[in-house]
Image: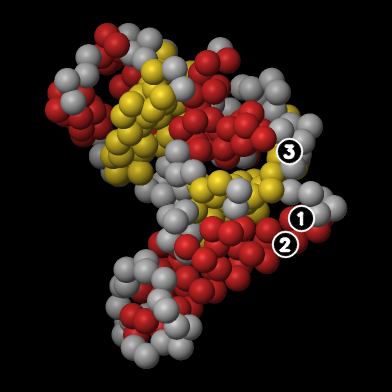
Amino acid sequence: MLLVIDVGNTDAVFGLFEGEKLLHNFRIKSLKDENYVYFEYRFRQYFLEHSLRFSDIGKVVLSSVVPPLTPIFKSLVHNLFGLDAIVVNAHIFPSIEVSIDNPDEIGSDLVANAVAAYTKYRRNCVIVDFGTALTFTVISEEGKILGVSIAPGLRTAVKALFSNTAQLPEVPLELPNSVLGKNSVHAIQSGILWGYEGLVKNMIHKIRAELGGDCIAIATGGLSSIISTLNGEFVEVNRELTLEGLRIIGESI
């Protein structure tokens, strides 16, 4: 099996593939203050509970946007599987060219998203990733990553509001029926979620305009289904797009 690891700012997501089929998918919190032992314990626990053997893993692909955790996961892969992880960077997939000022600045997760989208569609595409950050990655039909836009993610925006205003409560990310907030929770839900609906639609509109109108949109990330009214903007809502991109990268090496 192929193991892919996507270490993000909130969670480290793991996917076990057999061919193109995702057999297992699990998450561990990306706790930057935890040491190697914590992550190894959680990993061993999952494998034990699901009757998985370390010897079943033949290759590991690692994407990490959390530098302090990267060496921990590289050591984890080496110690548990006896393998060197394939670490994703901007130059790892020959069919994709990162056409920005400094290619090494781009997040490896965004590279994986672009690989998955380009492999499937071969069209101008914007990938909207609803994660800790809300990112818009634009890839051309020629396989060039043309640029990236970044905004605070939904949960990040709510936490920022909650932590800086003493009288406002932390709220669940649920799209309210009305934009007219009748209480503090409803008001925050309205402002953040309906506001972000407009943000996403406007960004997609502007990106399409710059590309002459020909650009499909794909949504991914753990929060991609929260704003359900956006579904009509996307040809696909795929929470596992990053994992699929990492699989494609692993199969190409």
Mark pair 3, 1: CA separation? 12 Å
Instruction: Say which of 216 and 154 sits in front.
Output: 216
- Residue 69 position (above or below residue 166): above
Q: Is residue 66 visible?
A: no
Q: Amino acid at mark 2?
A: His
Q: Which residue is mark 3?
A: 123
In which quarter of the view is residue 114 placed? top right
> Are the residues tagged 2 and 1 within 8 Å (C-beta)?
yes
Label ID, residue 208: 1
**Which residue is depicted at the point 41% across and 24% down?**
21
Q: Earlier in the sequence, mark 2 or mark 3?
A: 3
- Residue 143 position (above or below residue 155): above
Colour scheme of this structure image?
A: secondary structure
**Which residue is depicted at the point 70% across and 28% down?**
96
| Secondary structure category for the residue under label 2 | helix
Mark pair 2, 3: CA separation? 16 Å
Q: Which residue is mark 2?
A: 205
> Are the residues tagged 2 and 3 within 8 Å (C-beta)?
no
Give the image location of residue 171, x and y in percent.
32, 72
**Which residue is depicted at the point 32% across and 9% down?**
82
Q: Amino acid at mark 1?
A: Arg
Q: Earlier in the sequence, mark 3 or mark 1?
A: 3
In which quarter of the view is residue 60 placed? top left
Q: Residues within 10 Å of mark 3 (few under 14, many from 20)?
A: some
